[in-house]
């Protein structure tokens, strides 16, 4: 919304965006061991695409635009004991790396905290402004 | 100037969704302000209706949080903080105006 507390809604949009990213990372981490048969596509990494938000011609933070899906090929691995294994003993595993997801999670978490911090600073500034002259 | 107490104006505060009172924003210092005595009451009334509007939005979000229907915790906190700050601004402006009025009432003539 517009109005006197513009920086609050800007920080709020950042909080929302990084929450969405954290949700996507949580989904990736939860499915990191999701195996599929070689006829199906692998679990595809969730990738959040964000865009700058503009309201009434002025910059108003960021918003998650859409969620793209990663590589459907994944990794074909040999695991003949797996119930989904094909006649060659192969299954398909997701094509992304757990370590990369954990690194992304730290980035998203710190970015969320940074936005929360900016939000708190803005709120304190507005409250100090109300004390001017009293 | 015709009236002894110039009405208090708050032209610099943009209350967003509410239409700023015409008389309060257009009046310029030194101009004869006929009927401008209403403008402060009207400005406070408009500000209060803005507070009320934000409060209703926060109430709705609080209800959704209670029934487990809330999409985003941060949206709720942003709305709650905006409502809180708007209330504080309105109360601060009202307090200043009343204290100015009281100062004048206590004046020894």
Image (cartoon, rainbow, N blue to C red):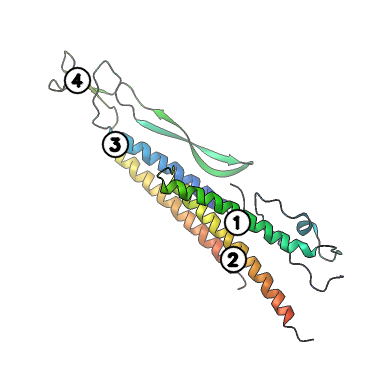
Q: Depth check: A12 or B23 in front?
A: B23
Q: Are marks 2 and 3 on the same chain?
A: yes
Residue B25 in the figure: left or right of residue B61 = right
- State the mark number for residue A130: 2
Residue at image x 48%, y 48%? B61
Q: Which residue is mark 4?
A: A84
Cα separation, mark 4 vs mark 3, equals 21 Å
Q: Which residue is mark 1?
A: B51
Cα separation, mark 4 vs mark 1, equals 59 Å
Q: Which quadrant, please, contains the C terminus of chain B? A: bottom right
Considering only order in the chain, which callout, 2 or 4, is on the residue closer to the N terminus? 4
Query: What chain letter is assigned to the residue under label 2?
Result: A
Residue A18 in the figure: left or right of residue B107 = left
Q: Are marks 4 and 1 on the same chain?
A: no
Q: Depth check: A97 or A26 in front?
A: A26
Label 1, secondary structure: give it. Answer: helix
Please, is residue A40 above or below residue A102 in the view? above
Considering only order in the chain, which callout, 3 or 4, is on the residue closer to the N terminus? 3
């Amino acid at each position: 919304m517009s109005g006197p507390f513009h920086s609050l809604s800007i920080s709020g949009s950042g909080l929302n965006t990084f929450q969405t990213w954290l949700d996507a990372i949580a989904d990736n981490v939860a499915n990191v061991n999701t195996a599929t048969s070689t006829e199906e596509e692998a679990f595809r990494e969730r990738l959040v695409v964000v865009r700058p938000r503009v309201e009434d011609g002025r910059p108003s933070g960021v918003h998650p635009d859409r969620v793209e899906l990663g590589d459907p090929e994944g990794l074909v691995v040999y695991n003949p004991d797996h119930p989904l294994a094909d006649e060659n003993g192969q299954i398909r595993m997701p094509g992304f790396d757990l370590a990369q997801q954990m690194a992304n999670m730290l980035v998203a978490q710190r970015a969320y905290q940074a936005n929360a911090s900016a939000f708190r600073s803005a709120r304190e500034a507005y409250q100090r402004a109300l004390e001017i002259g009293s | 100037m015709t009236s002894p107490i110039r009405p208090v104006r708050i032209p610099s505060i943009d209350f967003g969704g509410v239409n700023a009172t015409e008389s309060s924003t257009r009046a310029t210092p030194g101009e004869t302000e006929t009927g401008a005595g209403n403008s402060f009451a009207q400005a406070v009334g408009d500000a209060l209706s803005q507070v009320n509007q934000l409060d209703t939005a926060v109430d709705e979000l609080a209800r959704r949080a209670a029934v487990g229907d809330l999409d985003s915790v941060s949206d709720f906190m942003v709305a709650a903080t905006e409502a809180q700050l708007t209330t504080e601004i309105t109360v601060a402006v009202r307090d200043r105006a009343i204290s100015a009025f009281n100062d004048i009432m206590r004046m020894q003539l």
